[in-house]
Image: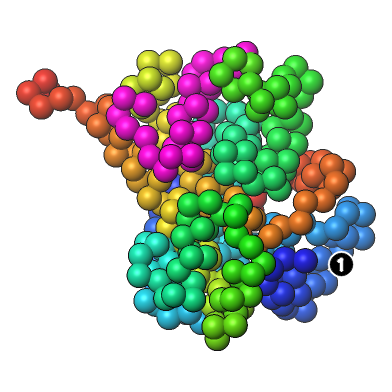
Amino acid sequence: MMRLRILDSGHGFGTKALFALIRAVSRQPVLDVIKLVKYRADFYGRPMSAITQEAMRGPSVWSVGDRELMAAIVAQTNRSEFCTKAHSAVAQQAYGDGKNVATFLSKLDTGGIPEPLRATLLMLRKLTREHAVNSDDMREVLASGASRQQIEDALAVCFSFNVIGRLADAFGFSVPDDDAFEAGAKYLLARGYR
Amino acid sequence: MSDIRQQRNALTKRILEGAGQASFSERRAAFHNAGAADAVSSLVDKVARHAYEVTDEEIAAATASGLSEDGIFEIVVCAAVGQASRQYETALAALNAATDPAPGME
């Protein structure tokens, strides 16, 4: 149960019917993040999903896997268990077997992540942890080979997940088992965040 | 290139200026993490700075102060979006400073 009852059970009839369908088809519980974006969707869910869709699936030099890894790093830095597991699962599915996301997450500095992704992830981690970065930090990322546009794209991902991770923890999302995250990841790769 | 400027403006405008149960001033205070009412100020600050430390008791205390669950929902969303916005804008300013030619070097 989330900390606000409205987020668990305050949805309209049509949305409740949709949740029943999701449960029947996926054979998984409806993730709390879905319940949140569907609650009074005109206030938060729809405008936020437009941002997240653009950041995660809009045109970018970064691959979908790279952007999901950025989301997982932001979530991990914010100590948001739900979002870390959710986006690690998406990143791993997007990358396939050639890369190990768990290793990337535990050894960001030395885990063999190629530049300029590594320098970008380190900058996002600092921004998330300290709430600020300076021009020297940005020069380092540029020197690693990232373009200005790539940095802007990464900051868009960072914005989205600094919102979502906070809400996950403040509202108390329950953390389901790995099967539910795998199913969620498959859905997010196929359909995006719309 | 992804561009979230318009979408971010739309979200901010909706949560701060659109219809809601929390007052405009309550939502603005949460967004800026400044001047929130006593009943929610520690909740707002935690959402902004370390959301993983929010407890059941803090949400319950906000409810007990007379706020509706919808009002608390709105205030927490505003606090989260506000902090993420400050981070984003600080980082963009740092990027601009790193990429703009120094004065006299144009």
**Mark 1 element type:** helix
Side (left or right) of B61 relative to A7: left
Determine whether A173 is above or below A16 in the image. above
Residue A79 position in % (x across, y down): 62, 43
Q: Which quadrant holds residue B100? A: top left
Query: Where the N terminus of chain A falls, by quadrant?
Result: bottom right
Question: Residue drawn at (18%, 25%), measured in percent from left and top?
Answer: B101
Q: Main secondary structure of the magenta part?
A: helix
Residue that carries the numbered disc 1 in the rendered image? A20
In this view of the protein, which residue sits in the foreground, B11 or A138? A138
Which residue type does callout 1 highlight? Answer: Ala
Residue found farthest to the bottom? B66
Residue A175 position in % (x across, y down): 77, 51
Callout 1: chain: A
Question: Residue drawn at (60%, 55%), measured in percent from left and top?
Answer: B53
Whether residue B87 is visible here, answered yes or no, is yes
Query: What's drawn in magenta, residue-wise?
Result: A112-137
Determine whether A67 is above or below A30 in the image. above
Residue A171 position in % (x across, y down): 65, 63
Q: Which quadrant holds residue A39? A: bottom right
